[in-house]
């Protein structure tokens, strides 16, 4: 069960109205944004919350304590005109970090702290702050997104996402004036540098559009999954990972009308 989070804000809550679009890009009404869109944008909290969520996925790793040490070499000492490193009987150097097959000088250890932790209230305020940043065109452009609308966030009618085919998704995004950002992500998709290209992650694609829906079982997931950089997430599972990739707020976001109601119930902003 999703619990409502009450957030206190020193400034006055200002209600904003934004237009609601249909699948053709025509205005079919308007909607009052939830009060969380008036929350101040805290870049420091957003960055810290992102690091906490990102590092929570990391698995501690280390080396075998005996790696590179399973040898019986001994130093020959002085007087042999060779370095005083452990050697085998055939004079091959072993064990030392600079030798072939030797141990690592400073191997990874499982004791290393790799996870950033954050307080629960800070995490909630960071998510609210990142949601507010999606309604700021200046922050969205600062992230590098391209769009044609003057008013953000973009809100669509629930029926607009009743699509299954990717071709219909392209038409919808063109009508909303955001398909140019999909093309940006497609053109900047590149081959990864390093050995990761041999390990199932050959390509790197920039983050593009975020679509927040009201139902996690919509067929729209199939329609948008082939578009580069596009993520579809239900409003009940919206997190800092989706809203601020890399810890940078201002992702270009499309909300369904019912998804805003879910967010309204999830976050409640009260003026002091």
Image (spheres, rainbow, N blue to C red):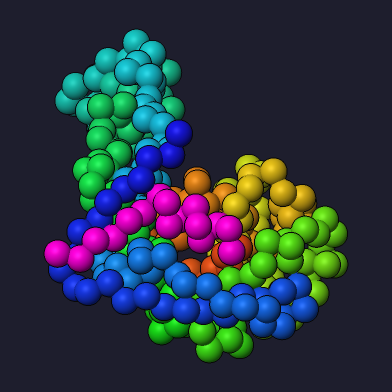
Q: Position of residue 260 (x, y in %)?
A: 51, 61
Q: Is residue 181 visible?
A: no
In-image side of 23 versus 48 (left or right): right
Which quadrant of the structure image shows residue 30?
bottom right
What residue is drawn where x is 85% and y is 59%? 165
Instruction: Label the magenta part by its dominant secondary structure.
Output: helix
Compared to 257, does 28 lie above or below? Answer: below
Q: Is residue 202 visible?
A: yes
Q: Position of residue 35 (x, y in %)?
A: 35, 66
What residue is drawn where x is 51% and y is 79%? 18
The N terminus: image quadrant: top left
Is 129 within the magenta? no
Q: Position of residue 181 (x, y in %)?
A: 63, 77
The C terminus: image quadrant: bottom left
Q: Position of residue 101 (x, y in %)?
A: 43, 28
Q: Nearer the viewer, residue 119 or 200?
A: 119
Compared to 7, does 252 lie above or below? Answer: below
Q: Nearer the viewer, residue 64 or 90?
A: 64
In-image side of 254 versus 60 (left or right): right
Q: Nearer the viewer, residue 161 or 58?
A: 161
Considering every residue shown, the one lying at the far top of the view is: 72
Compared to 135, does 126 lie above or below? Answer: above
What residue is drawn where x is 33% and y is 37%? 98
In-image side of 221 versus 15 (left or right): right
Segment tinted magenta in the rendering:
257-272
Q: How many marks?
A: 0
Is 262 within the magenta? yes
What residue is drawn where x is 60% and y is 63%? 256
């Amino acid at each position: 069960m999703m619990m409502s989070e009450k957030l206190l804000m020193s400034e006055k809550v200002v209600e904003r109205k934004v237009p609601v679009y249909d699948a053709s890009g025509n205005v079919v009404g308007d909607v009052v944004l939830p009060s969380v869109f008036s929350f101040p944008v805290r870049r420091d909290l957003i960055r810290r919350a992102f690091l906490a969520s990102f590092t929570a996925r990391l698995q501690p790793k280390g080396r075998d304590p005996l790696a590179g040490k399973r040898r019986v070499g001994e130093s020959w000492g002085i007087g042999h005109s060779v370095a005083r490193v452990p050697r085998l009987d055939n004079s091959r150097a072993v064990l030392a970090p600079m030798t072939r097959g030797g141990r690592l000088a400073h191997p990874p250890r499982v004791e290393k702290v790799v996870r950033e932790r954050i307080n629960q209230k800070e995490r909630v305020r960071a998510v609210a702050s990142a949601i507010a940043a999606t309604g700021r065109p200046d922050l969205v452009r600062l992230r590098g997104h391209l769009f044609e609308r003057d008013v953000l966030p973009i809100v669509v009618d629930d029926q607009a996402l009743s699509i299954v085919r990717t071709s219909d998704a392209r038409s919808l995004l063109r009508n909303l004036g955001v398909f140019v950002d999909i093309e940006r992500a497609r053109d900047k998709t590149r081959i990864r540098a390093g050995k990761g290209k041999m390990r199932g992650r050959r390509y790197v694609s920039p983050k593009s559009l975020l679509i927040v829906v009201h139902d996690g079982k919509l067929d729209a997931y199939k329609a948008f999954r082939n578009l580069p950089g596009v993520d579809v997430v239900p409003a009940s599972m919206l997190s800092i990972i989706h809203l601020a990739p890399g810890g940078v707020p201002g992702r270009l976001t499309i909300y369904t009308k019912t998804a805003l109601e879910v967010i309204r119930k999830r976050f409640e902003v009260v003026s002091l």
